[in-house]
Amino acid sequence: MSNNNEIKYINKKAVAILRVSRDKHRDGFSHDAQLKYAQEYCANDCNDHKLELVKIFTLRKKSKKSDRGQYRAAMDFISKNKIGNVVFFKTNSESRNATDLEANEQAVKQGKFILHFSYSRKCLHKKSPESDFLARTFSSLMASSFARVLASRIKDGLKAKAETGWYPGSKPPLGYMRQSVIVEAGQSKTRGAIVVPNPETIKLVQREFELRAQGLSLESIKKKITVEGLVMGRKALEYKLGALSKRLKNPFYRGQFMWNGILYKGNHELIIPIHHLEVGKMNGTDSVSDAQPECLEPERIGTRMPINPVNSKKVG
């Protein structure tokens, strides 16, 4: 990519767009590291000029939809404020969407802004050769292909873990917590975790089921729990009937868990006495909107486990 005096600046205003995955950045570069590169680059860019870094956009990868919305907001700001320089960390972090890549290329060729890549200290401008644009496109599309393959492997790994009887999500229901597996010499495995009772929240959940088994309504359970001090302060304000209803109906407390529409038999330890489960089920007549089992959506944790299927059934 061009790195010479052919560059004709529209202006010296710059915007940095940083992409940060929910998991640790696969390149090993955190948000702070990317920010440092952007700031140092703007102080002395590929053409030994100083750029005025007027705004920094951090795109945090939570979902495809949210990432897309954040990116559009950044590009709209650049267009509205006539920003002449757009700084990305690497070529493969600019965009993995062919439409966006083409739009940015056309904007550069029309002289609307210059694309800068702080890690390689390279840039693309109106007079850059076609080979530079082609190299950028190829790098971005390769990153997109890698991301799709990785997502598929993660999905397979989570399913395999569920088939072994262990909940693959990163946020188990209240009363439980994730714990690393201990191997020889007392060391924990670097990958993979199982679900175990959480000593900090187990009493609250056990008391909820106990009160339900006594025939108390959801409202009465909430009042009792609050009076007994099992939830206090901010937690008391966040203690909602809807969440309580979901817990009482969640199959996780009966030794099963939902994953992608399939009910699996779990290996996790039961924390609710069977008697309370059965009696509470008969008393479960309260009507609360959206009272569906919690923690049904997958959480990407990147764990791959050997397949050892247990009995499971599809739920309609």
Image (cartoon, grey):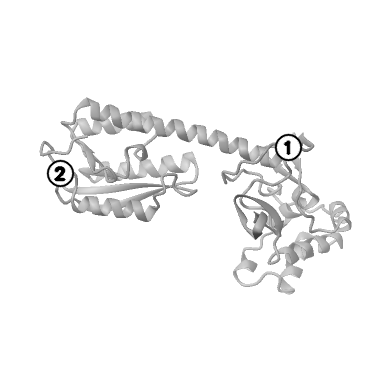
Question: Along the horizontal axis of the image, is 191 left or right of 282?
Answer: left
In this view, the mark in front (1 or 2): 1
Measured as percent of width and height from the top left, residue 277 is found at 84, 54
Kindly check if marks 1 and 2 are in contact, taking CB atoms under 8 A apart as contact.
no
Between 67 and 28, the one lying in front of the other is 28
- From what the image shows, is residue 114 above or below residue 173? above
Residue neighbourhood size for the residue with mark 1, other residues' Cα within 10 Å, grouped as few (<14), some (14–19), many (≥20): few
Q: Which of 246 and 256 lies nearest the eye of the viewer? A: 256
Tag 2 secondary structure: loop
- Please give the residue where the numbered disc 1 appears in the rendered image: 308
Point 14% across, 48% down: residue? 49
Residue that mark 2 sits on: 47
- For the N terminus, the image quarter is top left
- The extreme left residue here reads 5
Image spot of residue 298 (x, y percent): 61, 43
Q: Where 162 falls versus 129 (above or below)?
A: below
The amino acid type found where label 2 is placed reads: Asn
The residue under the point 71% across, 49% down is 291
Q: Is residue 190 left or right of residue 159?
A: left
Residue 314 at x, y percent in the picture:
75, 34
